Amino acid sequence: MALYMAQFTYTDEAWAALTKNPQDRSVSVRELAQQIGGRFIGMYYCFGEYDGVILAELPDDTSSFAARLVAVSTGDLKVFKTTKLFTIEEAMEAMRKAGSVRYQGPSKG
């Protein structure tokens, strides 16, 4: 399973609906992750560029893409950005692999 972070921004209409009828959207997100074969870790609202963040483990990139398609198909999101996250161990493995490769960049002269 791979770890993914999804950052999202609701439309004004979605915020109006949530303000009129508050809902725990993490319930639906958890169900979506499970239906895709994954595990929901958490959902958080925040200040700033995005309205919220979702963390989930999903089987692979195709499953993550499928979850994204389902989420944006409702029309309630104006921004949805997915980032694949790597554990420290995965990053260290990549560092070791990169350290064993020879590569020459463009000539500067």
Image: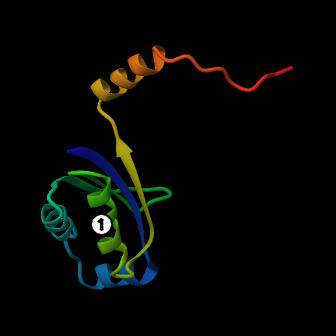
Rate crowding at label 1 as few (under 14), some (14 to 19) or many (20 or more) other CA atoms within 10 Å: few
Q: Residue at x 60, y 20 (%)?
A: 103
Q: Is residue 4 above or below residue 93?
A: below
Question: In the drawing, does residue 53 fall left or right of residue 30?
Answer: right
| Tally of numbered tags | 1
Question: In the drawing, does residue 80 fall left or right of residue 87?
Answer: right
Task: Inspect the image, locate mark 1, and give the three-letter code of the amino acid beneath it.
Answer: Ala
Q: Is residue 15 above or below residue 67?
A: below
Q: Quadrant of residue 96?
A: top left
Image quadrant holding the C terminus, namely top right
Q: Residue at x 39, y 25 (%)?
A: 94
Question: Regarding mark 1 in the picture, which secondary structure is present there?
Answer: helix
Specify the color scheme.
rainbow
- x, y percentage for residue 21? 24, 83
Front-most of residues 109 and 90: 109
- x, y percentage for residue 43? 25, 57
Q: Residue at x 21, y 51 (%)?
A: 59
Q: Quadrant of residue 36?
A: bottom left
Q: Residue at x 46, y 21 (%)?
A: 98
Front-most of residues 60 and 42: 60
Q: Residue furthest right?
A: 109
Which residue has dot 1 on it? 66
Front-most of residues 10 and 31: 31
- x, y percentage for residue 25? 22, 70
Question: In the drawing, does residue 90 fall left or right of residue 27?
Answer: right
- x, y percentage for residue 31? 13, 67
Image quadrant holding the N terminus, namely top left
Q: Is residue 21 above or below residue 7?
A: below
Question: In the drawing, does residue 15 fall left or right of residue 105?
Answer: left
